[in-house]
Amino acid sequence: MSVRERLGSLFKGQEELDLTSGEIAKPLFFLSFPIIITNLLQVMYNLADTFWLGQFDSPQPLAAITFGFPLVFLLISLGMGLAVAGSVLVAQFTGADEPRKAEYAASQTVTFAFLASALLGVLGYFAVEEFLALLGAKGRVLLLATEYMEVVALGLPFMFGFFVFISLMRGAGDTITPMLVMFGTVVLNIALDPFLIFGWGPFPALGVQGAAVATVFSRGLAMVVGMAIMLAGTRGVRIRPGEMVPDLEYVQRLLRIGVPASVEGTGRALSVNALLFIVATFSVTVEAAFGVGVRVFSLIFMPAIAVDRGVETMTGQNIGAGKPDRAAAANHFAAKASFAILALLGVVIFAAAPAVMDLFTDEPGVIREGATFLRWVAPTFGFIGVVRAYSGGFRGAGKTLTAAAVSITMLAVIRLPVAWFASRGLAPEGYWFLSTPSPTGIWMAFAVSNVAAAVIAFLWFERGTWRKADLTEEDVGSGAEDVGEASPTDD
């Protein structure tokens, strides 16, 4: 078998996928597998920064991006709802065989997403230092984190533009093209990092700020390539310049789906930031261990996130096609598969926790504390897979508010209170390992919230209220009537 044939057995283009009929496992796999690779490559941005900054003698650069990463996540999450809304509408219009309405939705999504991210970037630039200080960053860590985040804030429209490209292409069923574009820009970012961080060759030594410059430049290039692909219309969904003029009536439709999705993403980001406030009450060593641990989780959870996005697309297209039973079957299959895969990964990480930490830092204290963190959370990895699978189904059906409610319950109602009380030595009498202030309480909170959220997501999905997605009638049936029946070449 040739290399091309072997690759073809793993990846299938959107023209080869039928998400609304036939078996479920294969199309979900071929839809999700490229997303795993894309997300893995995206994580490489953060891992590359972590690796190179970990080469400094001091843990301060690592601690700085520990504070910076959640803020990046927050800024992107605030605007990510528009990308989710665009993906859901494109998926449902595609399932309903309404390609022109899918194109109009994509065009409007690009416009409003760019405007929103530009506004967030400007506001973020002037607020990052105060926000980081509020989280507990201080001294040189605060200075380095601020330098990092100022660059990221100014480059937010370019970074966010690529995320929108990924979302819209996924809604149309194309997950391969974003993967290929991501691969090229990750290679560029990894190559640029040491030159800009350490000042190799003709470049100045920018330290932590150099990592941010490399990331913004690489993702900006990815955005340009992605927009060019959609303008050409040869893959995925097409955007048309004439339909990118802001439609204030249509943005209401995007916001109705997108605001709850932003709440979900923002809730995740705020929870990490709030946890940082608790983490910052301990030593820099704990801060660095938390930062590395969270990055390891972002890598391990790639299969669950990929299945989440794959189920979102399958649910959206099947809801658009009027097949809610098939959408339900896809969700249940995805939950079982995600649980099995992540549970297995949890066993591996539990056994190899110190070795995993050693990949990112030479500091013995960081390795020891980080390994403890990983071993508390690893046994509950499978439950994260269940949460993500059903959350994807809720979003695909247009029930983004339900997905947000599950996320907020998991993070704000369960994880944060448990982390605070347990780490303060305020646990009930008899829990000797939590009787004094210790970061162990924070690590335990992750495990407790993961299990509880999986149970909540399953029970909520079983209620079946997602089947009554109002998008089926209002948006898929009558959206973008003013687009008309333009020819495929009409711009």
Image (tube, rainbow, N blue to C red):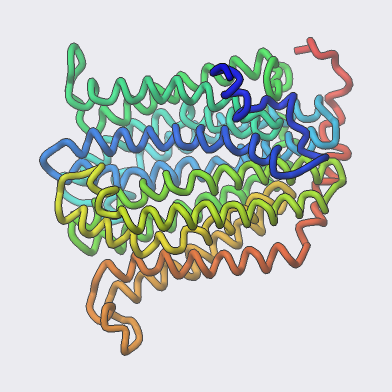
Q: In this view, does 459 lie to the left or right of 355?
A: right
Asked whether the viewer can see residue 107, the reply is no
Q: Residue 232: horizontal and vertical position, in percent?
A: 67, 13
Q: Residue 217: horizontal and vertical position, in percent?
A: 38, 22
Name the residue located 38 percent from the left edge and 48 percent from the top edge: 70
Q: Nearer the viewer, residue 488 or 337?
A: 337
Q: Nearer the viewer, residue 442 or 24?
A: 24
Q: Residue 133: horizontal and vertical position, in percent?
A: 27, 52
- Quadrant for the N terminus, please: top right
Q: Is residue 224 left or right of residue 192?
A: right
Asked whether the viewer can see residue 118, the reply is yes
User: Where 297 sits versus 56, above or below?
Assistant: below
- Quadrant for the C terminus, please: top right
Q: Is residue 57 left or right of residue 147?
A: left
Res 107 → quadrant:
top right
Q: Nearer the viewer, residue 109 or 232?
A: 232
Name the residue located 56 percent from the left edge and 57 percent from the top edge: 339
Q: Residue 207: horizontal and vertical position, in percent?
A: 20, 30
In the picture as drawn, the residue positioned furthest to the front comes out as 1
Name the residue located 48 percent from the left edge and 63 percent from the top edge: 411
Q: Nearer the viewer, residue 90 or 241?
A: 90
